[in-house]
Amino acid sequence: MISREEIDNLANLARLDLDEAQKATIAKDLGNILDYVKQLKEAEGLDKVEVEDYVATNVMRKDEVINETGKLSSNLVEAAPKHNEQYVRVKKIL
């Protein structure tokens, strides 16, 4: 079980203003968490568990260049109703 002094110290470090009911609840919850961690540490057979290396494989498609540089943008400019060599002409919007 965690002591009141430790709860007060943690509340002070976290800049929390806790009343007595909240401190009791936090003490109970932290005590339960610490007990669970203690149970995990005492578990038998953990040294027998082998950790397998995880190998990540890429399931995505390969990156391939589909269009030549600038060809797509020039096709888009040519498809516009009003265009110059490199620009699309649009109406003024103010």
Image (spheres, rainbow, N blue to C red):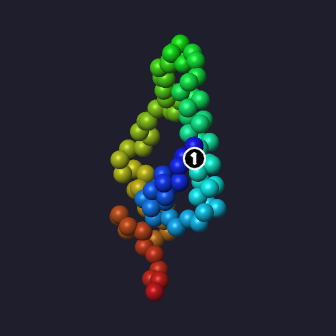
Q: Classify 7 as above or below 87.
A: above
User: In the structure shown, which secondary structural element does the residue marked by tag 1 occupy?
Assistant: helix
Residue occupied by mark 1: 30
Where residue 23 sits in the image (x, y, percent)? 58, 58
Q: Position of residue 76 (x, y in %)?
A: 46, 58
| 21 displayed left or right of 13 | right
Residue visible at 63% across and 55% down in the picture: 25
Image-quadrant location for residue 85 = bottom left
Can you tell which quarter of the image residue 34 is in? top right
- Image spot of residue 9 (x, y percent): 45, 56
Q: Nearer the viewer, residue 21 or 15?
A: 21
Q: Let me know if residue 4 appears in the view.
A: yes
Q: Is residue 12 left or right of residue 21?
A: left
- Please tell me which residue lies in front, 63 or 9: 9
Residue at 56% from the left image edge and 34% from the top image edge: 37
Q: Is residue 4 above or below residue 45?
A: below
Q: Amino acid at mark 1?
A: Leu
What residue sits 53% from the left and 49% below the top? 3
Q: Is residue 62 left or right of residue 27?
A: left
Q: Residue at x 43, y 36 (%)?
A: 64
Please tell me which residue lies in front, 56 or 53. Answer: 53
